[in-house]
Amino acid sequence: MKCSHNLTIPSEPALKDLSLDEKLEKIQKYLPKGITEKILEQRDRIEG
């Protein structure tokens, strides 16, 4: 009960929500080019 650790202050910064463009930019190097293009063609269906 008295560990002297402040539980109200997060120990790690919260991750920010990334936009679809930011997410694609991060994973694009791991995907074949054709897959990336298909994702971009259907972005209005998968966004959100």
Image: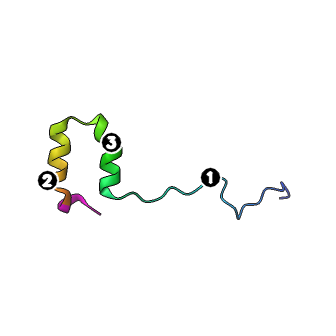
Question: In terms of secondary structure, what is the magenta stretch mainly?
Answer: helix
Q: Nearer the viewer, residue 2 or 18?
A: 18
- Spatial CA distance of label 1 from label 3 is 23 Å
- Where residue 8 sits in the image (x, y, percent)? 70, 65
Are there few (<14), some (14-19), or many (20+) residues within 10 Å of tag 1?
few
Q: Is residue 28 left or right of residue 6?
A: left
Residue 22 marker: none
Are there few (<14), some (14-19), or many (20+) residues within 10 Å of tag 2?
A: few
Q: Residue under circle 1? A: 12
- For image coordinates 43% across by 60% down, the residue present is 17
Q: Earlier in the sequence, mark 2 or mark 3?
A: 3
Please give the label number shown on residue 41. Answer: 2
* Residue located at (62% from left, 52% from top): 12
* Residue where numbered disc 3 is placed: 27
Determine the residue positioned at 33% across, 42% down.
Answer: 27
Stretch of the chain drawn in magenta? 44-48
- Kind of residue at disc 2: Glu
SS for tag 3? helix
Circle 3 packing at 10 Å, graded few (<14), some (14-19), many (20+), is few
From the viewer's perspective, tell me whether residue 17 is left or right of residue 35.
Answer: right
Secondary-structure class at tag 2: helix
Pick whichever of labels 1 and 3 is earlier in the sequence: 1
Q: Give the residue type at disc 1.
A: Glu
